[in-house]
Image (cartoon, grey):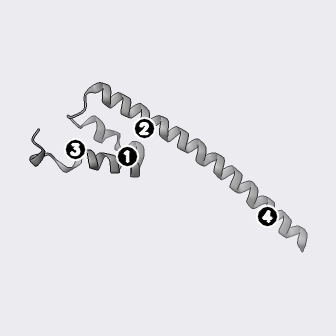
Amino acid sequence: MDKSIQKWYLKKSVLIVAILTIGPFALPLIWFNPSFNKRVKVLLSIAIIIFIIILNYALGVILIKSMKILQDSYQSMLKMQ
């Protein structure tokens, strides 16, 4: 496809921004993009899904630690009164 008439949502720069901002919701942009072969589409999809799983796990750990710190802070404040 000629780059001058390529649709905006098929551009690789749009795809990168979409992956960084909306994560797995950008997967249809990968699968509808004719410039990628099936192997690349599968590899990109797996990589994005693994990244999202790792990110969610890390955010969960951070949330649990934050809640523990908050709970300890409230308990120490209650002991001071």
* Marked residue nearer the N-terminal end (3 or 4): 3
Query: Marks 2 and 4, Cα distance to the nearest angstrom?
Result: 37 Å
Do the numbered discs 2 and 4 sit on residues whose CB atoms are within 8 Å?
no
Between 28 and 59, the residue placed more toward the observer is 59
Q: Disc 3 residue type?
A: Leu
x and y, in percent, of residue 40 in the image? 31, 29
User: Total of numbered circles in the picture?
Assistant: 4
- Reply above or below: 44 against 73: above
Task: Verify CB contact (< 8 Å) between mark 2 and mark 1.
Answer: yes
Q: Horizontally, is 72 left or right of 26 in the view? A: right
Question: Spatial distance from mark 3 to mark 4, Cα to Cα?
Answer: 50 Å
Q: Quadrant of the N terminus?
A: top left
Count neighbours of disc 2 (C-alpha within 10 A) and say few if under 14, some if 14 to 19, many if 20 or more: some
Local packing at callout 3 (Cα closer than 10 Å; few below 14, some 14-19, many 20+) is: some
Give the mark nearer the N terminus: 3 vs 1. Answer: 3
For the point 31% across and 25% down, the residue is 39
What quarter of the picture does the C terminus occupy? bottom right
Q: Are marks 1 and 4 in contact (CB under 8 Å)?
A: no
Residue 54 sits in which quadrant?
A: top right
| Res 37 label | none
Residue tagged 4: 73
- Residue 57, percent from left and from top: 59, 42
Q: Which residue is mark 3?
A: 10
Query: Looking at the rendered structure, which numbered label has been put on residue 48?
Result: 2
Secondary structure beneath dot 4 equals helix
Task: Work out how far the residue at label 3 is from the one at label 2, CA to CA, in angstroms.
Answer: 18 Å
Query: As displayed, is residue 74 above or below residue 18?
Result: below
Residue 35 image offset from top left, x and y in percent: 21, 34
| Residue linked to disc 1 | 19
